[in-house]
Amino acid sequence: MVGCSTPNPNVQVRRLPNGQLQVTGPLAGPFKSTEELAGNVCELITRQPGASSGVYGIEYCALIYYLSAADGFFLSHLSDIQGSRVGLTKSCRVPSSLDDPQHLDAIILGRGHNHPHNRRFSDADLSEARRWVPTRIADARTGKILRRELLLFYREQAGECRSYKYDYADRVVAALRDGVWVPIGSVNNDQGLIDLYDGQDWTP
């Protein structure tokens, strides 16, 4: 008898008739800031099956969104639908639609994903072709200006979970250190090549 694996409750994604991927939400939140969100969900995402399995692992991705009524940031459920791969490159097809029936006023701010075998953003992640515009969006209810961001999560072999952020507006890469985003470099070209600041690197 062939056993059936139990579906992962954290993965809730479906393909819409127009071909777009939609995830449900929320999986986690509310959080007061993206720092708090990243510090909490890094463990959750990188402990998914295969998420930290090196070159044999897979990527998971999700949407990050904001609710003005809660004044908080949320993480959607995950997608595990893989994109095209070249060699050892991993990719997850990022969902573009959110299904959160209780929060129809959700503002999608960004995307989050893990890397199973390296802690760096890929050049493609940071390229101009993938820049999400508009890079800033206003909350009509409060007037607050919010930035669109890309988050990356990686678990070291020793178990430490690292979080990184790419700001689509100013094209700065930051690392989460002691609960604070610390800028470590910037992107100044269309190809997505990062220039690290003096004295900064991907690890402290």
Image: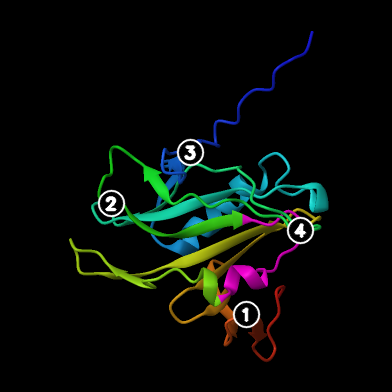
Earlier in the chain: of badge 1 and badge 3, it is 3
> At 70% across and 74% down in the image, what residue appears?
202
- Disc with the residue nearer the chain's start (4 vs 1): 4
Tell me how many marks there are: 4
Identify the residue position indicated by label 2 in the image: 70
Magenta residue span: 114-127
Q: Where is residue 117? Give x, y as percent.
A: 77, 57
- Please name the predominant secondary structure of the magenta segment in the image: loop
Left of 60 or right of it: where is 22? left
- Classify mark 1: helix, strand or loop: loop
- In 3D space, how far apart are the residues under numbered discs 3 and 4 (Cα atoms)? 23 Å
Residue 160 sits in quarter: bottom right
* Residue 200 rendering spot, x and y as whole percentages: 68, 84
Q: Which mark is residue 78?
A: none
> Mark 2 and mark 4 in contact (Cβ < 8 Å)?
no
Q: Nearer the viewer, residue 105 or 199?
A: 105
Q: Which residue in the structure is indicated by mark 1? A: 191
Q: Which residue is mark 4?
A: 86
Badge 3 is on which residue?
A: 15
Question: Disc 1 vs disc 3: Cβ atoms closer than 8 Å?
Answer: no
Gap in angstroms between the C-alphas marked 2 and 3: 29 Å
Q: Which is more toward the observer, 145 or 17?
A: 17
What type is the residue that disc 1 sits on?
Gln
**C-alpha gap between disc 1 and disc 3:** 30 Å
Q: How is the image coloured?
A: rainbow
Farthest top residue in view: 1
Q: Residues within 10 Å of mark 1 (few under 14, many from 20)?
A: some
Of mark 4 and mark 2, the one earlier in the sequence is 2
